[in-house]
Amino acid sequence: QVQLVESGGGLVQAGDSLRLSCAASGHRFSSCAMGWFRQAPGKERSFVAAISWSGASTLHADSVKGRFTISRDDAKNTVYLQMDSLKPEDTAVYYCTLRISGYSDICYSKTYEYPYWGQGTQVTVSS
């Protein structure tokens, strides 16, 4: 049974940095594509970043490109989201996602492409 546990959220000021972590269990992590999505109050869940099974391919939403970076550490079964230069509009619940992709260097950016989701971690950025 796949489980995803996010951590690292919190309350920060605009311009600060945070690093979110997501620990995965229940499946061979190295054959899984991973992603991050977020949902702000009153808005739909939206794509933030994705990384392929090997880490060779990454994809970031235009709204976070140049500020956020997704990475993975297969030895720790963990995916990270480094968030720099945070803005108030980054305030949201952030969700970690997993897709058992096999050995294909594709990044997935649609919610329906990920069958496994974490519970989410709150990120609040004050102005």
Image (cartoon, rainbow, N blue to C red):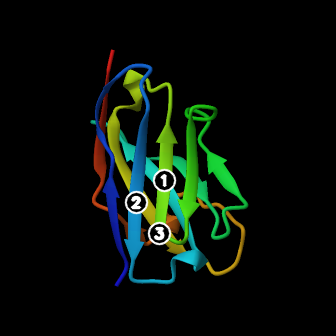
x%, y% of residue 93? 31, 44
Report the front residue among 39 and 78.
Answer: 78
* Kind of residue indicated by mark 3: Lys
Q: For residue 109, say whether it is visible.
A: no
Which residue does the image show at 57% across and 32% down from the upper left? 67
Q: Which mark is residue 51?
A: none
Under tag 1, what secondary structure?
Answer: strand
Name the residue located 40 percent from the left edge and 60 percent from the top edge.
22
Judging depth in this view, the residue of 8 and 109 nearest the camera is: 8
Q: Which mark is residue 22?
A: 2
Residue 123 coordinates in the image, percent (x, y): 31, 37
Decide which of tag 1 and tag 2 comes sooner along the chain.
2
- Whether tag 1 and tag 2 are in contact, CB under 8 A, the answer is yes
Image disc number at residue 76: 3
Q: Nearer the viewer, mark 1 or mark 3?
A: 3
Separation of residues labelled 1 and 3 (CA atoms)? 11 Å
From what the image shows, is residue 118 above or below residue 93? Answer: below
Q: Residue 81, percent across and down?
A: 49, 47
Image quadrant in which you'd find residue 105: bottom right
Residue at the disc numbered 1: 80
Packing grade of label 2 (10 A; few <14, some 14-19, many >=20) is many
- Between marks 2 and 3, how big is the CA–CA gap? 10 Å
Give the image location of residue 6, x and y in percent: 33, 57
Distance from the alpha carbon under mark 1 to that under mark 2: 6 Å
Q: Where 105 sits versus 121, above or below? A: below
For badge 1, the amino acid type reads Tyr
Q: Is residue 72 left or right of residue 88?
A: right
Mark 3 Cα shell of 10 Å, populated few (<14), some (14-19), many (≥20): few
Q: Residue at x 53, y 63 (%)?
A: 34
The answer to which of marks 2 and 3 sits earlier in the sequence is 2
Would residue 76 appear left or right of 30 to someone viewing this image?
left
